[in-house]
Amino acid sequence: MTAKRPQDWSAEEKLAAVVEAGAVAEGELGAFLRARGLHQAQLQQWRQRLLASLSERPSGAAKRTRAEARRIRQLEQELRRKEKALAEAAALLMLKKKARAIWGDEDEPTPAPSGSKS
């Protein structure tokens, strides 16, 4: 089984190498790098990338989540408004049906009073 090239290392492996190299004494750093198959330049590059990524602001993700939260609130408000309108329409429909059942349909002719002469 062959060892992976440093270019093929995962981010976790690179981080571990940077941390381990930071703990190694100056005089032993060359032996550490040879044992891992690394160059000083690679280690410095990884360290710089790590520091750069740690100093970046999470503005893109934070803005996105704030925008998503705002959109969710708007959609929830719209949903509540529509639910109220639907409930009102259902109540009016039920009242209309009850009124028809009690007073009859408006289109039906009303029967003539029984005591009148026609």
Image (cartoon, rainbow, N blue to C red):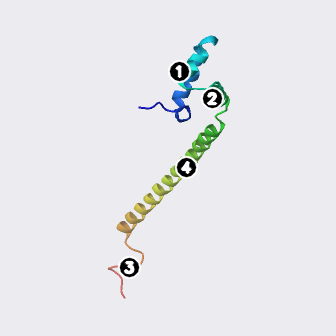
SS at mark 1 in the image: helix
Q: Position of residue 74 (x, y in %)?
A: 58, 48
Instruction: Please name the amino acid that badge 1 sits on.
Output: Ala
Q: Which residue is mark 1?
A: 35
Badge 3 vs badge 1, beta-carbon distance below 8 Å: no
- How far apart in space, not on screen, are marks 2 and 1 (Cα)? 14 Å
Which mark is first along the chain, 4 or 1?
Answer: 1
Q: Position of residue 39 (x, y in %)?
A: 61, 26
Instruction: Please name the amino acid that badge 4 sits on.
Output: Leu
Residue drawn 67% across the image and 32% down it? 56
> Which of the 4 quarters of the picture holds residue 114?
bottom left
**Residue 62 circle label:** none
Q: Which residue is mark 4?
A: 75
Residue drawn 50% across the image and 52% down it? 84
Mark 1, Cα crowd under 10 Å, few <14 / some 14-19 / many 20+, is: few
SS at mark 3 in the image: loop
Q: Position of residue 80 (x, y in %)?
A: 51, 49
Residue drawn 61% across the image and 42% down it? 64
Q: Is residue 20 above or below residue 70?
A: above
Which mark is first along the chain, 1 or 2?
Answer: 1
Instruction: Please name the amino acid that badge 2 sits on.
Output: Gln
- How far apart in space, not on screen, are marks 3 and 1 (Cα)? 100 Å
Badge 2 vs badge 1, beta-carbon distance below 8 Å: no
Q: Which residue is mark 2?
A: 42
Mark 3, Cα crowd under 10 Å, few <14 / some 14-19 / many 20+, is: few
Residue lying at the far left of the rendered structure = 114
